[in-house]
Image (cartoon, rainbow, N blue to C red):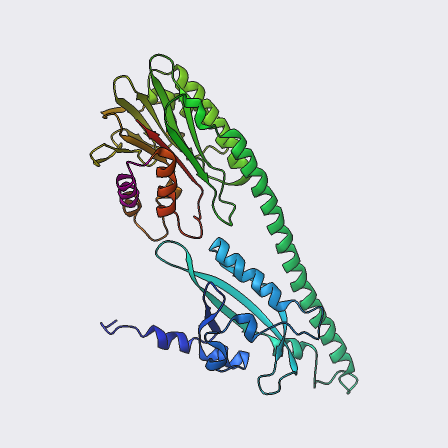
């Protein structure tokens, strides 16, 4: 291929299918020639106008629901950031030349998100396939049946038309029931997650803030967890975060088992590496713990020392009082169940001055689609350093505000901030 730049505007206009671009406000931003032809509208009648201003439901048909179904699909795409293919829809489209007259149309729509740099949905690609003529052909209009008058062919065609439309509606209703069932599971799983995650008061007088943010509009929730425990011997606490692969009730259940096991192990282990060794052996017998990650830190407030160990998890961040940022990445090992036989995990130590800040988090805070993980880590380090003088609660809120997309993340997020 030569160096000539591709004219994507020309490509868009030449697409053989009917395609329009909608803003998050459901306003037409653009439409190709085929969409204008299929919809019977000019660019002036579409661009800059709300989709349901241009195509409302037929007010004379109380059962008309095509446009309401389309709106529900578009809003789900905005909320979930995921592509959605709709069942066959019947639309009554008002004639642009004869206001008040409505044409019966059948469209098969697909709605797909266009993501911005921060992962939010900035446009929706709305593609429709016009199947009205197919439906009419199946209805045998103008055809001739075995009796010579088209009666048998027309009757059979109308039956096929009714069956096709009925099956499409049944599919849509089934999808809606599945969505409602998933929503109920999500609600139960989040309630279970909230009940199992500990409160900050378990670390005594030390200043700490904890946050959990579920993924917005998706089932990819309830795999993240955190834990803060008082340790035996001296002025010490253990702070951990982890991530379970999976979602919903199953992930919440696995998360609870791993968090409880690490909490118990930390209270008796000589250090964080030993605690993760115990947790790794336990993870081998827990269904659903495959590829789970965790990082734990033991903080000694008397000697200003942090001892840490990681099992495949993003590194904690230590922000020193002078603003210097240190990633605690010198004791990183594979995920909890990655080794068939137990092998001692590494651990490392680092010193800090009073007033420093420690942050532990899960990957939902720093990972973005089509972005290098180090970009997210740099963004986190910058936010923590700039707001380091804020109290832990305010600092946690500021970090979430700056790092999570405006519409919410597509993965759940846990964050722990400790003022040392």
Is 186 placed left or right of 346 in the picture? Answer: right
Which of the 4 image quadrants contains residue 356? top left
Residue drawn at point x = 25 percent, y = 25 percent: 354
Q: In this picture, is 249 found above or below 22?
A: above
Image quadrant where residue 388 sits = top left
- Residue 44 placed where, x, y %? 47, 81
Which residue is rendered at x = 37% and y = 36% of the image? 361
Magenta stretch: give its range: 378-390
Image position of 133 (left or right of 237): right
- Does 267 sit left or right of 146 as displayed? left
Query: Residue shown at 37%/75% (left/top)?
Result: 11
Does residue 236 show up?
Answer: yes
Instruction: Give above or below for 120 relative to 296.
Output: below
**In what quadrant of the picture does the C terminus appear?**
top left
- Which residue is located at x 66 percent, y 57 percent? 173
- In the rendered image, the quadrant that contains the N terminus is bottom left
Main secondary structure found in the magenta portion: helix
Asked if residue 201 lies left or right of residue 71, the reply is left
Query: Does residue 281 appear in the picture of this structure?
Result: no
């Amino acid at each position: 291929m030569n160096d000539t730049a591709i004219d994507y505007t020309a490509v868009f206009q030449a697409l053989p299918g009917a395609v329009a671009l909608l803003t998050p406000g459901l306003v037409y931003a653009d439409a190709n020639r085929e969409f204008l032809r299929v919809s019977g509208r000019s660019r002036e009648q579409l661009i800059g106008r709300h989709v349901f201003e241009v195509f409302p439901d037929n007010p004379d048909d109380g059962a008309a629901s095509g446009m309401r179904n389309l709106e529900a699909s578009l809003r789900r795409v905005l909320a979930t950031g995921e592509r959605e293919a709709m069942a066959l829809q019947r639309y009554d489209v008002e004639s642009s030349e004869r206001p008040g007259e409505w044409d019966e149309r059948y469209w098969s729509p697909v709605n797909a998100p266009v993501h911005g740099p921060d992962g939010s949905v900035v446009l929706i690609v709305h593609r429709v396939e016009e199947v009205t003529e197919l439906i009419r052909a199946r209805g045998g209009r103008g055809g001739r049946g075995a009796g010579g008058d088209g009666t048998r062919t027309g009757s059979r065609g109308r039956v096929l038309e009714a069956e096709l439309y009925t099956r499409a509606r049944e599919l849509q209703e089934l999808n809606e029931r599945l969505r409602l069932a998933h929503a109920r599971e999500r609600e139960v799983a989040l309630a279970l997650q909230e009940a199992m995650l500990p409160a900050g008061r378990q670390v005594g007088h030390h200043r700490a803030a904890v946050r959990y943010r579920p993924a917005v509009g998706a089932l990819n929730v309830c795999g993240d967890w955190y834990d803060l425990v008082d340790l035996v011997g001296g002025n010490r606490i253990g702070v951990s975060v982890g991530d379970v692969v999976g979602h919903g009730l199953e992930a919440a259940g696995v998360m609870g088992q791993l968090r409880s096991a690490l909490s118990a192990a930390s209270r008796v282990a000589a250090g964080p590496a030993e605690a993760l060794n115990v947790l790794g052996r336990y993870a081998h017998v827990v269904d659903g713990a495959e590829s789970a990650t965790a990082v734990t830190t033991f903080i000694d407030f008397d000697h200003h020392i942090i001892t840490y160990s990681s099992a495949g998890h993003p590194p904690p961040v230590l922000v020193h009082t002078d603003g210097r940022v240190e990633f605690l990445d010198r004791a990183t090992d594979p995920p909890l169940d990655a080794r068939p036989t137990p092998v001692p995990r590494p651990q490392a130590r680092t010193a800090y001055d009073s007033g420093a800040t420690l942050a532990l988090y899960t990957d939902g805070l720093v990972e973005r689609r089509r972005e290098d993980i180090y970009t997210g880590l740099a963004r986190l380090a910058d936010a923590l350093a700039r707001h380091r003088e804020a109290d832990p609660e305010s600092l946690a809120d500021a970090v979430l505000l700056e790092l999570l997309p405006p519409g919410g993340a597509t993965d759940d997020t846990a964050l722990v901030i400790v003022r040392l």
